[in-house]
Each structure stands twice: as C-alpha cells, then as structure tokens.
Image (cartoon, helix red, strand yellow):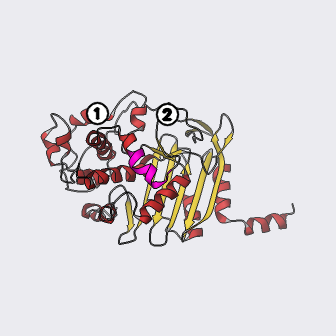
Amino acid sequence: MSVLLATLALISANPVDVAIDQFIESKQSPGIVVLVKRDGKVVYERAAGYANLETETPMSMDSIHELASVSKQFTAVAVMTLVESGELKLTDTLASFVDGAPDSWKGITIEHLLHHTSGLPDYLEGEVDLGKMTTDKFLIEYLREKPLVFAPGEKWEYSNSGYMALGYIVGKVSDTRFGSYVSRQLFEPAGMKSAVISNPLIVLPKRAYGYTKFGKEFRNESLCSPGYSALGDGMVMASARDLVAWHDSMLEGKILSRKSWDYLWTPSAQSVTNESPYGGGLMIERAGERPLVSHSGGWLGTMTFLKSDLASDSCMVILVNCDSADPRELLKAVSESFGFDPQLK
C-alpha cells in the first residue's frame, strides 16, 4: 500500500476502531469489548484481542467478564426487591442482622449502606490475603473490630464494605444464597441470559480470563478466594449484551416499581455535597425522570464501564480483561464518536 493510500485509510477509519486497535497493539489489555446503543438501536459492537491468551481464544461479544463494582447496582436492586416485599425496611439497622454487633452499628441503616454514608471502614484496605478462603460472615466479623471512619450519615465516602454488608443482609433475609437470589430475581426477569455470580474455580464457557501486566508481559490475575468474588460489592459476571438487557430492564421499569427505581436514581445529599452524586449503586450524572447513570469497576484482572442514558434509550459498555490498563483515551474516543459525556465515573 502506498503512503497516500495508507494515509487515506487512516483518515477514513472509524475513530473507535482506531482507538481499539491502538489499545490492543500497545498491550494495554489482551482483549476488549465495546458496545454502544444509541437512540434505541445498537450502533456499534466490537470484540478485539483475546479472551484467553493460553488457548488463543478470541474475545467475542458473548465473552463473559467479571464486572467488579458495576455489580453494585444489582445488589442495590436486590435490596429494593426485599423492601417492596416488606421483608426489609430502609430504616432497618446493620446491627439488627449481626449478633453482638457493636453499638456504633445501631445507627447504620440500610439506606446508609446503599448510599455510601455508613462510615464503615473498607474491608479491602491494608494487607488482605485475597487467596484465603473466606465468607461474608467472616468479613462482617472482621469489620466488627474496626472503628467507624465517620458517624453514619455524616458524609459520603465510597464503601465496598457497605455493599458487602448489603449482600450479607440480602442472603440472610431471603434465607438463600445471595447469588442464587440475584440470579432468580434479577438476571432471569431482565433477560440476562449468560450472567452468573463470579466464582474463579468453576468451569465457565466463554469466560474472559483476567490478566495483569508485569513489565511488558501479561500474567494471569492473582488467585482470589470464591468468598471474595461472590460478595455484594462486586460479584456479577456478564457479557456486554447482558448489560444491554439490564439497561433495557431499567428503561422499561422491570423488576422494581417506578417509586423504587426513582429512589435508586436519586443522589444522596451527602454525595452531592461531595461532588460525587450517587444514588443506590449508581453514579447519577443527570437526575430526573429519565436519568443518566453510570458505574465503573476495577478488580483483579478486569476493568469495566457501563453508562445508561434513559432519556434517549442509549448505553455504552466497555469491558477489559486486564486490571492495569488505562482506558481513558479509549473511553474518550467512544464517548465523542457517539455523543456521550466522556467523564469516567
């Protein structure tokens, strides 16, 4: 190809395709999936690179990724299903679900946990052995010994512990495993056909294996106990198409009443003061009857992003199977090409 033809090809190329090619060629990640729905129609979808480097399995639109903190919205919705059924109240306290809970937990309500205003310290801070077998009950006991970082309701601070505790509460109230409850009450009615609860030990067809980068080479993500993987702060694995189905379920008002959806889409006063408007499991980029909501996620071997604009029936999904990638330029290219605010929440 001549220099002129090569230049013309570059000029005419889709900027998102170019950004994805550069992302893969620069070894930001073994693989990536990008899907964009705009004004009710899927206008772009592409899978590039590898879902598994060892077997050289190509990434596909059906590859199933660990969503990390994008999962928090599922936990929030699970909580609200129990509120609607009368089995749980937003004013119920964390202490009421934990025998011998410290006095400080008597002031922490379900609402505080949903909105990141509980004051619980992050259970992932400090030296944590993620390979050690554990359970949410064990982690609740671990938090018992830690002082609150602020009084419940005093301010907003993003908290993995709050959503881990919510997952524990959902399991206890529903008298079933948290993951089973979410699968039955959320995934199935939303039409999320391949969504599952994360477990690194099971054989999962179409899994996008996670990687981290050491120098110029990729390595398998660090070993993580299934107990850490299946908590309420980041337990869902799903494909990009599953997330479009989830977007559609929010748009159509499935699973919850409109009142409950509105509650989850309304930022707390504390988060607004902190200039991080956050409702229930979602960043609120635009509030109102048809909000613009989003969440990002990062965990061992994965980086994820979901944005839903319910006013225009539009959403954007980016799934990356590497925890050390920098997706900001890619996010900017996708956002500018399809008319989304490129701010990464």
What's the magenta bit mostly, secondary-structure-wise? helix
Q: Where in the figure is residue 174, as x and y percent of width and height?
A: 29, 42
Q: Locate residue 307 relative to residue 118 in the image: left or right.
A: right
The residue stretch that appears in magenta: 182-192
Q: Which mark is residue 283?
A: none
Q: Locate residue 197 relative to residue 98 in the image: left or right.
A: right
Q: Quadrant of the N terminus?
A: bottom right
| Element assignment for label 1 | helix
Q: Where in the figure is residue 117, as x and y percent of width and height?
A: 25, 53
Q: Quadrant of the C terminus?
A: bottom left
Type of amino acid at the residue the image marks with label 1: Lys
Residue labelled with disc 1: 137
Q: Quadrant of residue 170?
A: top left
Q: Is residue 117 visible?
A: no
Residue labelled with disc 2: 200
Q: Quadrant of residue 95?
A: top left
Mark sitting earlier along the chain (1/2):
1
Type of amino acid at the residue the image marks with label 2: Pro
Q: Nearer the viewer, residue 188 or 142?
A: 188
Q: Residue at x 45, y 49 (%)?
A: 188
Q: Nearer the viewer, residue 186 or 106?
A: 186
Density class for disc 2 (Cα within 10 Å; few <14, some 14-19, many ≥20) is: some
